[in-house]
Amino acid sequence: MCSCQIKSIIEIIQSVLTCLGILGAGLWALYLYLRQRENYPRIEFTADIIFHKKIGDWWILELIAFVENKGKVQHRIYKFKFDLASLNLNDKVNISEDFGGQVYFPNNITKGSFLPSKYKFFFIEPGVKGKYSYITRIPCNAEAVNFHTWFDYPVKRYLSCPLIIKLCELLNYKILKYSHTAEATKSIPDNL
């Protein structure tokens, strides 16, 4: 074997090892990308109730939901609902298994959506914190209120199409839904 053949074999081995190294580094980068879920938003979701003023027999209050996207991709919210219930002075303080053994607020005050019907979705860019607000009233005989809000994550990008979802429902195919919830409970202030 002459020196030029040995040189060719060494160059081939070097090329193969370089290709394997590049392929390995690419697979490792893909593994880390999927493992760290870089292609998903990272949502911090909180709720709050602000009492503004007592007027006549009503308290005016503001229901607030904060959604912060700490991820690296945009997050879209298609369903963004809430409900508000109260525990009044003469109500019994019961717990409910429907709510994991927590205190039951029997008086439904309002239900709604932060997403107006004219919009298909909200979006939150990476690094942005969105504030969503709803002004409502509660009767003065309420002692405490519980504000519960939630949004659903899109099931999969290809399943966010209403036609595909309807077809899955017709075929009785169970689609796993993922939600994010936030709650706030406050007692009614004595004076404001």
Image (cartoon, rainbow, N blue to C red):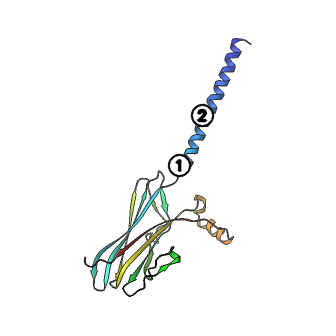
SS category of the residue bearing label 1: loop
- Looking at marks 1 and 2 on the same chain, the residue that comes earlier in the sequence is marked by 2
Q: Name the residue under label 2.
A: 22
Q: Front-most of 159 and 87?
A: 87
In the rendering, at what x and y percent does residue 113 appear?
45, 72
Q: Which amino acid does label 1 sit on?
A: Gln
Q: Answer left or right for 42 relative to 60.
A: right
- Name which quarter of the figure residue 155 lies in: bottom right
Q: Is residue 72 above or below residue 90?
A: above
Q: Is residue 46 above or below residue 2?
A: below
Q: Is residue 129 above or below residue 147?
A: above
Q: Which amino acid does label 2 sit on?
A: Ile
Query: Nearer the viewer's eye, disc 1 or disc 2?
Result: 1
Q: Disc count in the image?
A: 2
Circles 1 and 2, Cβ within 8 Å, touching? The answer is no
Q: Answer left or right for 163 relative to 153.
A: right
Circle 1 crowding by C-alpha within 10 Å: few under 14, some 14–19, many from 20: few
Q: Residue 11 carries which label?
A: none
In three-dimensional space, the C-alpha distance between marks 1 and 2, rounded to whole angstroms, equals 21 Å
- Name which quarter of the figure residue 51 lies in: bottom left
In the rendering, at what x and y percent does residue 8 appear?
68, 19
Q: Name the residue under label 1.
A: 36
In the rendering, at what x and y percent does residue 117 appear?
47, 72
In the rendering, at what x and y percent does residue 178 appear?
55, 64
Q: Front-most of 149 and 102?
A: 102
